[in-house]
Image (cartoon, grey):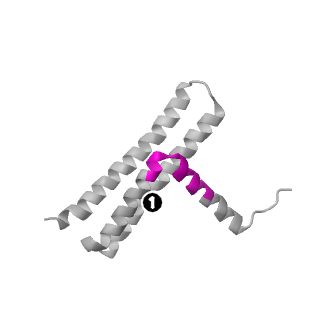
């Protein structure tokens, strides 16, 4: 019978996943750094609570998309070390999801921050 994990172990595994993503994925580091800049800048631009919540959801969408992309790439690499069209499709679609979420973040940032410049 499989032993149940403790809640603390489950959190430790999740943090290991975050750490792995940050250590090995350049784009994850870029997303985290960008998020940090946006979150630090938000109070200086007098971002409202609702706008801040939108920023948090947008940042989370990008980070989660990048982590799913990393997981899909790892699973595909585990399944095959040969070129396969379906492996290419899986990786490209996962990367496209990250691209769409990142473009969404740019649009959200534009609308929340640009109005304060003018």
Task: Confirm whether the magenta stretch covers residue 69.
Answer: no
Highlighted range, magenta: 16-29
Residue drawn at point x = 60 percent, y = 60 percent: 15
Residue drawn at point x = 50 percent, y = 46 percent: 25
Q: x%, y% of residue 104?
A: 33, 52
| Residue at the extreme left of the image, as rendered | 118
What element does badge 1 sit on? helix
Task: Confirm whether the magenta stretch covers residue 28.
Answer: yes
Quadrant placement of the C terminus: bottom left
Can residue 51 be seen here? no
Residue drawn at point x = 34 percent, y = 75 percent: 49
Q: x%, y% of residue 112?
A: 26, 64
Instruction: Depth check: give the residue in front, 53 or 14.
Output: 14
Q: In the figure, residue 79 lies in which quadrant? A: top right
- Up the image or down, 48 lies above or below 68; here it is below
Residue drawn at point x = 56 percent, y = 42 percent: 72
Main SS of residues in magenta: helix
Q: x%, y% of residue 24?
A: 54, 46
Q: Give the crowd class for mark 1: few <14, some 14-19, many >=20 residues within 10 Å.
A: some
- Up the image or down, 58 lies above or below 91; here it is below
């Amino acid at each position: 019978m499989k032993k149940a994990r403790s809640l603390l172990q489950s959190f430790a595994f999740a943090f290991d996943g975050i750490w792995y993503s940050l250590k090995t994925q350049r784009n994850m580091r870029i997303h985290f750094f960008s998020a940090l800049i946006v979150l630090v800048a938000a109070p200086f631009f007098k971002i409202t609570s609702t706008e801040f919540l939108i920023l948090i959801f947008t940042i989370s969408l990008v980070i989660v998309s990048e982590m799913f992309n990393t997981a899909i790439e790892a699973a595909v690499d585990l399944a095959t070390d040969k070129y396969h069209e379906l492996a290419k499709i899986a990786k490209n679609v996962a990367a496209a999801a990250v691209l769409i979420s990142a473009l969404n973040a740019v649009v959200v940032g534009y609308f929340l921050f640009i109005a304060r410049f003018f």
